[in-house]
Image: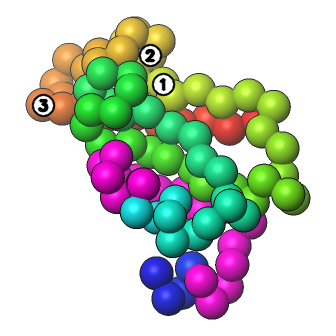
Amino acid sequence: MDTILLYSPDIIALQESVHHQLLDLEALLGDEYQWVGVGRDDGDKKGEFCAVFYKSEILAVESWKTIWLSETPEEIGSKSWDAKHCRIATQVL
């Protein structure tokens, strides 16, 4: 956290974060940052996230989506044929 606060990046991309960790980071960073992303298990708050935090005064998000790394990327919770867990990626424009 000290490094994030020291360098104050415009974008922070996270992997394998859970909802309560994102809320903790959101509280620590304050109003300067907004974030997008969903939990991999239910497309909402359950499971790990690939969240993206961004400085909302500098950057504007035109669109974003989370895809599941599977044969059916738009299907929430979908897995590839050999995966034990869902895998996701969050795309931000």
In the picture, the disc for residue 73 is 2
In the picture, the disc for residue 56 is none
Q: Residue at x 58, y 69 (%)?
A: 29
Is mark 2 in CB contact (under 8 Å) with mark 1? yes
The magenta-colored residue range is: 5-23
* Local secondary structure at mark 2: loop
Dot 2 alpha-carbon crowd within 10 angstroms: few under 14, some 14 to 19, many 20 or more? some
Q: Residue at x 44, y 33 (%)?
A: 38
* Local secondary structure at mark 3: loop
Residue 56: x and y in percent read: 78, 53
Q: Is residue 89 visible?
A: yes
Residue 82 sits above or below residue 75 on the image: below
Residue 18 highlighted magenta (yes or no): yes
Q: Is residue 59 left or right of residue 4?
A: right
Q: Quadrant of residue 87?
A: top left
Q: Quadrant of residue 41?
A: top left
State the CA–CA distance, disc 2 to disc 1.
5 Å
Q: Is residue 51 left or right of residue 9?
A: left
Of callouts 1 and 3, the N-terminal one:
1
Label 2 amino acid? Pro
Residue 7: x and y in percent read: 67, 85
Dot 1 alpha-carbon crowd within 10 angstroms: few under 14, some 14 to 19, many 20 or more? many
Q: Residue at x 60, y 47 (%)?
A: 35
State the CA–CA distance, disc 3 to disc 2.
16 Å
Q: Quadrant of residue 36?
A: top right
Residue to which mark 1 is pinned: 67
Residue 18: x and y in percent read: 30, 49
